[in-house]
Amino acid sequence: MRTTVKLKGQENGQEYEAKLFDEVTSDHFLKSQDLWRPVLYAAAKALKAQGKSIPRYLHWDWRQKASALGRLDASFYGIECGGRIQGLMKTDLGPLRRCRLDSQKGKELVYVDYVETAPWNNSEYMEVLGFKAIYSRTGTRLMQAAVQLSVDNEFKGRVGLHSLPETEDFYRAIGMTPVERDPNKQDLLWFEFTPDTAQSFLEKTV
């Protein structure tokens, strides 16, 4: 699957055509590490020097996820724009992934296992390095893909994930419901899309 989506320039507000795809390969993981990590490490060093929090996902290595490529219970998505990878996402359709919200408890969902956008799209990271962030909406487009995957699998848009502290505000902003902190997952906050909130999210981000 390859489809055209729109990203937004953070500096000029213009829309840019990007490609959302699910034919992710190990080469995309290699490129993401080569392109993203030097920028992320530099931003983390500068943030630390200013006494600010560094990214919790600094240790992530997409190359370690290559073993899941081709698994029936895992799906990967990427976004390319301007000749570079702007974001990657891994989702899980395993049978143990279930809703926790009282109104949906026990129902099947799509679990977003990992999602990351290129560091040059993060305003805080770029500002500390003296640059302007490039694109916005990358994370939103990837979450759209997760909701659509849920719909395609007859889960009615239900999506769940554990959020890192620095991304909790993003998931609230797109309409996901915070449910509980998970002591078995580093006390991360669990978020869900219900069928209604997922539909509202898709309608707002067309």
Image (cartoon, grey):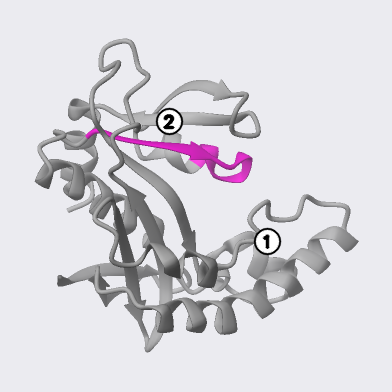
Q: Count neighbours of disc 1 (C-alpha within 10 A) and say few if under 14, some if 14 to 19, many if 20 or more.
A: few
**Which residue type carries mark 1?**
His
Left or right, residue 136 beside residue 56: left
Quarter of the image that includes the N terminus: bottom left
- Tell me, for residue 50, which label it has, or none: none
At 19% from the left edge and 49% from the top edge, which residue is drawn?
A: 149
Residue 38 visible from this viewpoint: yes
* 139 to 96, vertically: above or below: below
Left or right, 31 with respect to 40, comes to left
Q: Position of residue 92 (x, y in %)?
A: 33, 47
- Spatial CA distance of label 1 from label 2 is 23 Å
Q: Residue at x 59, y 62 (%)?
A: 123
Q: Is residue 71 above or below residue 36?
A: above
Residue at the location (73% across, 69% down)?
A: 43
Nearest to the eye among marks 1 and 2: give it: 1
Q: Which residue is mark 1?
A: 59
Residue 58: give x, y in percent of width and height.
68, 61
* Residue indicated by mark 2: 191
Q: Amino acid at mark 2?
A: Phe
Could you say which is closer to the camera, residue 80 or residue 175?
80
Q: Is residue 1 left or right of residue 137?
A: left
Say which element carries label 2: strand
Residue 61 place in picture, x, y as percent? 58, 67
As drawn, the residue found furthest toward the bottom would be 83
The quadrant in which residue 145 appears is bottom left
Q: Of marks 1 and 2, which one's residue comes earlier in the chain?
A: 1
Region of the chain picked out in magenta, as a range: 158-169
Q: Secondary structure at mark 1?
A: loop
Does the CB distance between marks 1 and 2 fall below 8 Å? no
The residue at the point 10 percent across, 47 percent down is 152
Q: Position of residue 188 (x, y in %)?
A: 59, 33
The residue lying furthest to the top in this view is 102
